[in-house]
Amino acid sequence: MQQSIIATVDIVLLTLQQQRLSVTLIKRDNPPFQTMAALPGGYIHAQEDNNCLDAALRILSTKTGIVPPYLEQLQTFAGIARDPRGWSMSVVYFALVASEVITAAQHDGLVVCAVDDLWHLPFDHNDIIAAAVARIRNKSYYSSLPCYLAGPMFTLPGLQKIYEACLGESLNKVSFRRKMDELNVLEPVSGQTEAHGAHRPAQLYRLKAQFKNQLQLLSRGL
Amino acid sequence: MQQSIIATVDIVLLTLQQQRLSVTLIKRDNPPFQTMAALPGGYIHAQEDNNCLDAALRILSTKTGIVPPYLEQLQTFAGIARDPRGWSMSVVYFALVASEVITAAQHDGLVVCAVDDLWHLPFDHNDIIAAAVARIRNKSYYSSLPCYLAGPMFTLPGLQKIYEACLGESLNKVSFRRKMDELNVLEPVSGQTEAHGAHRPAQLYRLKAQFKNQLQLLSRGL
DNA sequence: AATACTTAGTTGTAATTTGTAACTAATTGA
DNA sequence: TCAATTAGTTACAAATTACAACTAAGTATT
């Protein structure tokens, strides 16, 4: 009745490059689709991975060297059609990082591509990325999720641009600031401002300590 | 590197009994936890199940005889601690049905229990049910999801009671009707009303045909 | 048959929320 | 000193939402 199957974890690592929502791909080392760029992924190790989140963190760390501040289970994809070797199953996570983190990761074969410019990818990775983009778009309307695409410090005008890139539409300045205020996840960095050119400098903000690493919350079951 | 694992599918089959959100459990036939009530579940069959949704439908049909009008992937649970036999992984779905459907299903060992009255269940099934309840609570604020807990025909005052049971709070009559109107998923059953006692009878409504079975939409990829 | 009673459904208005424009503030360079 | 540009605030208009009071439709009672 029961049967053994191979389960993998794939991660949609999203970031912002040139104000565009982008996904991180890796050139594949092994067949099938060897040398082609695809989502970072790997097998679940039942001995060492306490759960799928651990597997996602391990794989992401091994293949990219990145520990993301935000990681959330997206969906599990399974079926006969997604892998030429036959029936397969993948638990997919999506992660958010600032682009500097990807730039700093000196791993070989990393490709960052805007999600709107993607070519045809191996497996069902186009579908998976589309699902991840839909999820972040939707959550950007009411959550602080896009903050994890910003660096450790950012200005409100800068953060607004990030939200606009996620949502694909421009936002009203006052409404945006009201929403961020209600979310209550930001704190001003006292005395710190960001000057750039002949203008009034903007106040710098950062995530409050308790929101800096969403992984801590996840491991505590929230 | 890669290793075989056993993957199961569990289903949180929710319904409304005496205006209370309730879950359907089945007495277990086999160890571990033999004879104890737990979520309906079973092994994924890679040959016959095109994807996990198919597996969920097959298991639900086999164990309860029910084909639910609404079925959605909830989350995948994995880890060492959830099963005494060791590391395990389960793709969990949640389904919604009218209570008449469960009453009509003449399968042995079915137990329907209000989610607020649950005792300690085997495996991590309490956690799983809590996640399902959180999902439906949240979605009830903006979606037509609770409609699938009603029978084929229902009145607006009756549907409001269902929404209130899902949300755990009372709703304003005018606001509720406005929301349902905006959702645009209901149609009046012409000339049909439901009389009950010495009062003005209420108009009967039903889901528009295209929303009657959400499974069709899912299999088309929406 | 008139009326009291109860629930269904609608209408009008108050309260709240959201969106916009116009203002003030702060900085640099001419 | 002032023009230019972006940051941030304030005041108000528009839209949405919540509530209360009303009308409608049925049965039971007198």
Image: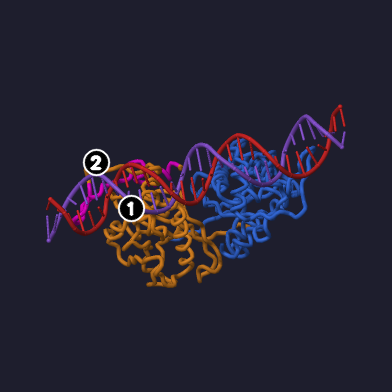
Chain colours: A orange, B blue, C purple, D red
Q: Which mark is residue A159?
A: 1
Q: Is C6 above or below relative to B76?
A: above
Within 10 Å of the Cα at label 2, are there few (<14), some (14-19), or many (20+) other Cα atoms? Answer: few
Q: Is residue A117 magenta?
A: no
Q: Nearer the viewer, residue A61 or A195?
A: A195
Compared across the picture, whether B99 is left or right of A150 comes to right
- Disc nearer the start of the sequence (2/1): 1
Give coordinates of residue B90: x percent, y percent.
55, 52
Q: Residue at (51%, 57%) from the top-left corner?
A: A76
Which residue position holds label 2?
A190
Check the residue under mark 1 and report the chain it is in: A
| Nearer to me, A133 or A140 | A140
Q: Is residue A196 magenta?
A: yes
| B135 w.r.t. A105: above or below | above
Visible residue check, residue A86: yes
Q: Secondary structure at mark 1?
A: helix
Direction from residue B108 to residue B211 in the image, left or right: left
- Give the x, y percent position of residue A42: 42, 60
* Region rendered in magenta: A193-220
Name the one closer to the observer, A84 or B175.
B175
